[in-house]
Amino acid sequence: MKNILVLGAGRSSSALITYLLDHAAAGDWKVTVADSSQEFAASRTLSHPSGSAIKFDINDTAQREYEIENASLVISLLPPHLHQLAASDCLKHKIHFLTASYLTPEMAALDADAKKAGILMLNECGLDPGIDHMSAVEIISRLKSEGCRLEAFKSFTGGLVAPESNDNPWGYKISWNPRNVILAGQGTARYIDNGVYKYIPYRRIFRDIEHITVSGYGTFDGYANRDSLAYRHFYGIEEIPTLLRGTLRQAGYCKAWDIFVKLGVTDDSFVIENAERLTYGQMIRAFLPSTHSTGDIISDLAAFCGLEVSDPAIELVKWTGILEDTPTGIPNASPAKILQHLLEKKWALRPGDKDLVIMQHQFTYVRGAQKEELISTLVVKGDNAVHTAMAKTVGLPLAIVAKNVLNGTIKSTGVMIPVQKDIYEVILRELEACGINFTEKVTQL
């Protein structure tokens, strides 16, 4: 019997673990869910006969090696900076390793050794990154085979809230790692526009936005992601004049979030001493310059941002409660952690809430003498606060790969992302069978 070791039982794990348990009997495998909280891990396995839950410390070398050595395949849902510990042990014991996180230079350096060991070390196999790569490469390959010349490719993805559960003015609830929500956009985004390299520093990320319309769901804010240029090679579009990857949020979100960025309260690089003694309002005042001090915090904030007090962005910030005289209650925390602590409560998914994942690819290309635009859109709605659309779209690609590696259908080895046809076709076809599929619309320009 084969053993699948799942490291981490967080927000994105529910669909993955359910799928693995549902297919365990047919695959003749067992599923071990390892988490820092055994109780939480057990809440995912639900006493399934093919599942087991263990308390796990990734930094316990002896335990980590023991569990990995006794696995046939490891799926890591741990924070990205911890993947390398597990990956190194997987390489040592010749165990397949899968994760949804971004491919790092350190992980890429293991490629030759992974091939020599005959194991697959697959990264970026979730939603974004993951399904975005697979669906984009499939369309790009199809357009190339039809003789089309690509001129532009833009892709946007958002983890949002379904309309029926949208009961706050931000139009947002947290369905994935809350820390990543707070730190989103940090660094400088790089992309190419009509052959010109473009760079957006963090201070402008939430100002330089595009407006993306999704049929049936309205118009969204789209801001640029990290390094779009790195994917030209993986997608086989090195000469494309325009390439941009971005994130979707409800209209108006970015203007309001930019206030937090401008203030500096998304900074996670330093600790505010005696933070637990401060109220949220006092913390905000500490970030406002002395020149903006009339005694009215809302007026001072609006003046600092160059906005009217009645501006919708100011209203959104006010709604969070961050301007109120409520104690933070968090000792020695960074501004980002204080903001996260507040928004985890304000943006919490209630048990019956449904989240929404939207992905849209925009291709502009020339077919013969005719320029065309192809819009490919994915919309997935969650079932509830546990079985979310985010958990489905992050977890199911990993689960499908795990099944097909163990049954021998996927034979690739080495360190990679899912842009090889033998990998992405298997995943996309089964996702379609699970109701996760794209719709396409072609327009002549």
Image (cartoon, helix red, strand yellow):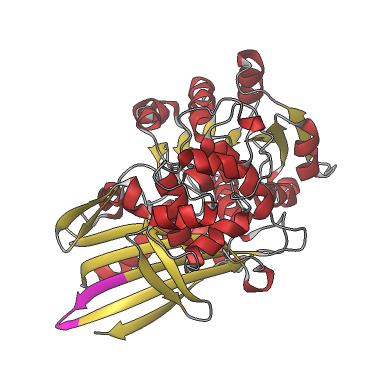
Report the quarter where the N terminus lies.
top right
Taking the view exactly as shown, the residue that stands out farthest to the bottom is: 444
Q: Please indicate whether residue 178 sits to the left or right of residue 84 in the image.
A: right
**Is 371 situated above or below 335?**
below
Taking the view exactly as shown, the residue that stands out farthest to the top is: 62
**Is 340 situated above or below 299?**
above
**Is 89 situated above or below 16?**
above
Nearest the camera: 230 or 206?
A: 206
Where's residue 431, x and y in %?
56, 62
Where's residue 326, x and y in %?
68, 44
Q: Residue at x 66, y 42 (%)?
A: 10
Nearest the camera: 204 or 125?
A: 204
Residue 194 visible at all: yes
Where's residue 304, x and y in %?
40, 52
Q: Residue at x 56, y 47 (%)?
A: 398
Q: What's the magenta region?
A: 363-370
Q: Residue at x 44, y 45 (%)?
A: 263
Q: Please indicate whether residue 204 sits to the left or right of residue 283 in the image.
A: left
Residue 1 visible at all: no
Report the quarter where the C terminus lies.
bottom left
Nearest the camera: 92 or 222?
A: 222
Residue 141 picture quarter: bottom left
Where's residue 417, x and y in %?
40, 45
Q: Please indicate whether residue 113 sits to the left or right of residue 402 in the image.
A: left
Q: Please indicate whether residue 83 sits to the left or right of residue 110 in the image.
A: right
Nearest the camera: 48 or 201?
A: 201
Look at the magenta stretch and give its main secondary structure. strand
Total labels: the figure holds 0
Residue 414 is inside the magenta segment: no
Taking the view exactly as shown, the residue that stands out farthest to the front is: 294
